[in-house]
Image: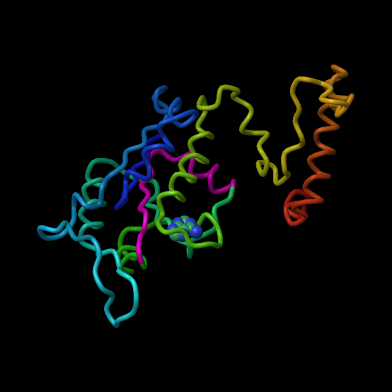
């Protein structure tokens, strides 16, 4: 899978993909993340990428021309399943969307800045708009990093344990059950007996009960989907 990210501040995207699981995914050739500096396509000798908004009002707007040039260059090189714009007024990201996007071959992600992007970019190029939550970030880069991480770890072979992504919180609309490791007794705080019993069927039942209980307590809204 290849993901191209267009940003006015690509430096913000260096670290998230240079370590741990996202780095391993790229080293194994399962994921390719390419970042592109929008300023390389800026206008005039100042490489301008933003301008005052028509009609007045505070805040600069990202211009269509640099973005259009960048997107058209990438589109000429390969086909994209989605061209995504990270924005607080997009569809709120959830696990189902990540599952769906992880099946695609190539994705392009555009990160916004300032007051937003010229509306015509959305009309002409963007196929999907994604928000990572009901709060406003100073730019789309951190949201893009979250999106790529959530998608990347679902690509088969990326996680060491092939099955573990299936048991994540949200995969079946339930939160994950509690997990424990050694020591089995920490200053009198003991691991539930059942997990040490070696009785796999009972352990599985206990985990499901715990997942339901935790979801009931913390996210009863998810249980409605689970029951359906
Ligand atoms: N850019 C600014 N705020 C954002 C958000 N909440 N989600 C995605 N991109 C954003």
Q: Is residue 83 magenta?
A: no
Q: Nearer the viewer, residue 208 or 177?
A: 177
Position of the N terminus by quadrant: top left
In screen coordinates, is 222 left or right of 58? right
Give me the residue at 32% from left, 58% from top. 125
Give me the residue at 23% from left, 60% from top. 49
Query: Is residue 202 visible from the viewing direction of this image?
Result: no
Q: Nearer the viewer, residue 83 or 195?
A: 195
Give me the residue at 59% from left, 46% from top. 95
User: Magenta span covers which residues?
Assistant: 95-114
Q: Nearer the viewer, residue 22 or 130?
A: 22
Residue 85 in the image: state x and y as whole percent. 40, 56
| Residue 26 picture quarter | top left
Residue 222 in the image: state x and y as whole percent. 73, 52
Q: Is residue 98 magenta?
A: yes
Residue lying at the far top of the rendered structure? 198
Residue 38 in the image: state x and y as whole percent. 25, 52
Residue lying at the far front of the rendered structure? 187
């Amino acid at each position: 899978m290849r993901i191209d990210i267009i940003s006015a501040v690509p430096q913000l995207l260096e670290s998230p993909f240079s370590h741990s699981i996202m780095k391993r995914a790229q080293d194994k050739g399962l994921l390719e993340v390419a970042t592109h500096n929008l300023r390389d396509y800026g206008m005039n000798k100042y490489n301008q990428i933003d301008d005052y908004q028509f009609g007045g009002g505070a805040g600069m707007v990202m211009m269509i021309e640099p973005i259009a040039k960048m997107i058209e260059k990438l589109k000429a090189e390969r086909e994209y399943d989605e061209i995504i714009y990270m924005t607080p007024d997009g569809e709120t990201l959830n696990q189902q969307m990540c599952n769906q996007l992880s099946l695609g071959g190539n994705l392009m992600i555009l990160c916004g800045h300032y007051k937003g992007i010229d509306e015509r970019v959305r009309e002409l190029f963007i196929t999907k708009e994604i928000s990572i939550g009901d709060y406003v970030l100073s730019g789309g880069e951190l949201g893009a990093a979250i999106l790529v991480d959530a998608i990347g770890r679902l690509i088969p072979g990326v996680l060491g344990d092939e099955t573990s992504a299936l048991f994540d919180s949200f995969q079946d609309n339930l939160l994950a059950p509690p997990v424990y490791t050694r020591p089995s007794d920490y200053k009198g705080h003991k691991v539930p007996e059942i997990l040490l019993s070696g009785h796999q069927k009972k352990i599985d039942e206990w985990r499901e009960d715990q997942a339901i209980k935790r979801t009931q307590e913390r996210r009863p809204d998810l249980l409605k989907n689970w029951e359906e």
